[in-house]
Amino acid sequence: MAKTSSIVLGLCLAVLAGRGAMAADATSAPTQWIPADAVLAVELFQPKALLTLFCDGKAAAALAALPGAGKRKAQPGFEKFMGVVKYLESQLGTDWPTGLGKMAGGGAAFALRPQQQVLFVADAEDVEMLKQLHEFLWKAASGNKNNATSSREVGGATAWSLGPKVAHTIVGKRLVASSGFDGLQTALEFRSKPGGASLAATPAYQAARRAVGPDAAGMIFVNMAALKQAPGIAKALQPKESNPLVALLFAGIAESVGASNWLAIGLRVQEKEDCLALQVVSDGAKLDPKGPAAFALPAKREEGALPNLAVPRQIAALSMYRDLRRFYGAKDQLFPERTSGLIFFENMMGIFFCGRDMTDDVFAQARPEIRLVVANQQYDPAIGTPSPQIPAFALVLQMRNPAQFREVMEEAWQKSIGLASFTRGQKAEPGFVIDRPVHWTTKYSVARFSSTGVKDRSKLDVRFNFSPSLAMPGNHLILSSTEQLACDLIDALGREAKQPPAPLAQTHSLLEAAGDRVAAALLANRDSMVRQNMLKSGGASEADSTGIDALIAFTEFVEQLRLTFSAESGMNQAKLELKFKWPGQKVAETR
Amino acid sequence: MATLTQQQFDPASAWARYEPDARRPWNLALAGHLYRRAAFGASWGQLQRALRDGPQRTVDALLRPVGDVAAFNRQYDELETPANDENSSNDLRAWWLQRMIRTPHPLQETMTLFWHGHFGVNAAKVNSARAVQQHLQLLRRHALGSFREMLAGVVKDAAVFLTLDAKASRKAFPDEHLARWFLEAFTVGPGRFSDRDVREVARAFSGCFVLQNQLRFIERERDAGTKRILGQEGIFTGEDVARILAEQPATAQTIVRKVYRWLISETAEPDERLLSPLVESFAKNHDVLQLAETMLRSNLFFSAAAYLQRMKSPVEFALGIVKGLEETVSTPPLAEALVRLGQNLLHPPTAKGWLGGQNWINHATLAGRHNLAAALLKSDGAFGGKLNPAAVASKHGTDARLFLDLFLQGDAEPSGDSGTDARRAAYAAITMPEFQLA
């Protein structure tokens, strides 16, 4: 019973929530009782809003729809747990979400401190209900044959322990819980010296609080200065200089996190849209406009990444502002080590582009607005379906001087396809056949694998996922992994040309993804993923498929994800918006 | 434990069924011995059941398991099929290890491993995961079946030809290297054929080409003349070569002697008189199952002449730990770890397979075995802490001797105080010299 009580208390402590108006001490927010040495803190300013989002019937239905939910429910532990919850509900005379709201109505904060100490502070709207819960748990734990309860005076208040590594007390309307009596003592010392050396009083926390804004329902605060003291984390945050692609994609993001003293994630609930928006802010330094990584800085105030393109079956799209000429020009500073990969890249580019200067003659031809698109494929039944199914992906650039660069690019592309065919031929594998068809008015190049002579079309070789294509409509350059996506992008750029979009000023990266499309891609490759999981875990297929099915189901709940990175007001900002789609809701089709 | 050595057996009593008696009782040590040779190792439950069932019923279960082996193999054939004709066979290697761990018919896998060593196909030379997979399936299909049929499959197997650098056997340039290998390593053995036989077998293989990783027969390159091979004359092809070589008594001697080293003992060469009943029988029916059955049921097998008379290969060492602790582990890192111990599955050092025996052990590989044992038992790391000696101990009793009995069946006493910690106790048992022996 003690174990059950601890679970219930743990559950209560983890999700207690409420509104700030009923704080134990009007001048004392929960974080004012949390010491400044906290490495991570989660503060809920409007917990009821979060409760509404996650504890209403739609979320419960969503959870119930997750694969494996039935099996979990059938376990004896789950039944016992639900029995206790139902008993508590009858004792407290309310359902559990309402009870949680009432018992922590004044806001809540959770902190992780050094030496794995945890501290939880919550203010009740209805302190009688909180006391009632305490009485019940105390009696249940005391009556257990393995009774490990104890109580003592801590900081002038009576504190209780229901078992090892858990202690709590109720002071006024405030519940304080910690991983031991020592942790409670530290928190209760703030009664006599409000503010003091608390987390809330630190300039970093205050700056983070201001940065997430007054309308946030909650905030996750990470003390990066303290976190970076750990050697493993410091190493992980060091910029990875060896991988140019990573440097290109994450420019401005990795540097910002590495230089920051704090990082805050603001939680905003948009109830009407069932949407949870996460805003990530840090005090990381802005990129040095003269530094080697400044290729990701929009040159002028109004410049930035373009809005993403939209194509049928689109899974995700990434739009970036990256000055490729500047990036390649700074490669010796960015990658001081001449790795074999870099040397190979330079050699191959030298061959494809006939020894032209890559910085001024090739990369300088591309404007900094770069877009990437990933979409599910629709396979031609006459050819068959490959396994695994790899989504199509494409890169869209804008050429500064298309008249001059078009032929240079065409030649380079054809050489690369020829080389790929030659290499495959050396291994007795079939190569590409190049074609030059026309889509509307755009003549493009495509390299296809011939399916003639293929016997089993139900499970084609993985190579049939690819039909590399090059299209150059107007001043755009499309490099696509499939012909289908290249044609879809020609259409999308045609639509865009009728109403050219304005750049997203000062935004250097924008990622958008559709959950149901990601889920579809995962579902198409479910068997392959289960196989890989089986191999890695050594488990049986049933166990390995449950996790993957849950991932697919969870992905389906995310209707849309939008992540933007910008550098405004001297601060690097990341904004993550997650829009959930609960079961039964229909999602508008992306064209 | 019986103390008779090989020299003390006459063939009739050596191959007669072992029936336990007061002088040679059926015990945990012999049950462990049987599982080490026929199933890579055993769990505590399997050992206890073997003790209850007795030797012959336990051998019955190992030879002809109750589970649906065909369905299991079909599932794993599907799972291990490469998505495309990849150059790397690393996934295939990992799948095979997982199959060895989970199969309801472990003897089939131990014998597949035996035949892999016999034919020595090397994935690095084949350069086609699908061709290697087909080769493995061929070995598995006949691992406990007919050697004659297996050889008939091998002469049409692209992986074997690619391993032996025999991509094109032209009429004008018959591949004598390929022919010599078939005669010397796969069948009759050295000194039992002439150079003329080599030339004639090479002529019989003319017309065999590996194109797009498949073996094709090109008629125009076929030498249609008469050949004389090991005393037989005719217009022979590769298939005829397989038949002729399988029928040779010398082939039966080669195979029986090799299986003897695999299942009975690699420390002493058996004399011809001892093997003669098995050779005679195998020469007639080419039946590997019957050969293995005779050996596994025999007095000789359950005697000191066989007990701990083999060095465990790295695969047997690792799987012995995994099977003993009743779990599965991530096999891609296990396959990599085995490379460091000298056994890179699907990549034997030569087409003669691994030398085995004492060659498995040197200072580096012994230290490597200890490191692998520690890594397998670690609560985190590459193997994810899946092996949990504490759980095994709590399931089967917390007697301090549990792991000694499980892994060594009383062949060794603890060298130091391993305390009550299950991981330490298990580690102490599996790093003992006796655990390196099969």
Image (cartoon, grey):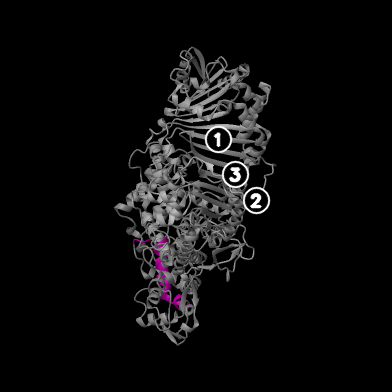
Q: Position of residue A365 (x, y in %)?
A: 46, 55
Question: Element under label 3?
Answer: helix
CB under 8 Å between callouts 2 and 3?
Answer: no
Residue B17: image tag: none
User: Which numbered mark, 2 or 3, is in the foreground of this view?
Assistant: 2
What amino acid type should be assigned to the residue bearing mark 2?
Arg
Report the residue marked by disc 2: A591
Report the residue marked by disc 1: A278
Which residue is painted at 32% across and 55% down in the image? B361
In the rendered image, which quarter is residue A260 located in?
A: top left
Q: Position of residue B60 (x, y in %)?
A: 53, 58
Mark found first going from the N terminus, 3 or 1: 1
Q: State which chain disc 2 sits on.
A: A
For this view, does B350 lie left or right of residue A551?
A: left
| Extent of the magenta region | B243-267
Q: Nearer the viewer, residue A500 or A296?
A: A500
CA–CA distance in space, label 1 to label 2: 26 Å
Q: State which chain disc 1 sits on.
A: A
Report the residue marked by disc 3: A555
Mark found first going from the N terminus, 1 or 2: 1
Which residue is painted at 62% across and 58% down in the image? A378
Q: Nearer the viewer, residue A44 or B147?
A: A44
For this view, does A92 lie left or right of residue B202?
A: right
The secondary structure that most of the magenta stretch takes on is helix
Q: Position of residue A375 (x, y in %)?
A: 58, 53
In the rendered image, which quarter is residue B360 located in?
A: bottom left
Q: State which chain disc 3 sits on.
A: A
Q: Identify the image quadrant of the C terminus of chain B.
A: bottom left
Q: Nearer the viewer, residue A492 or A162?
A: A492
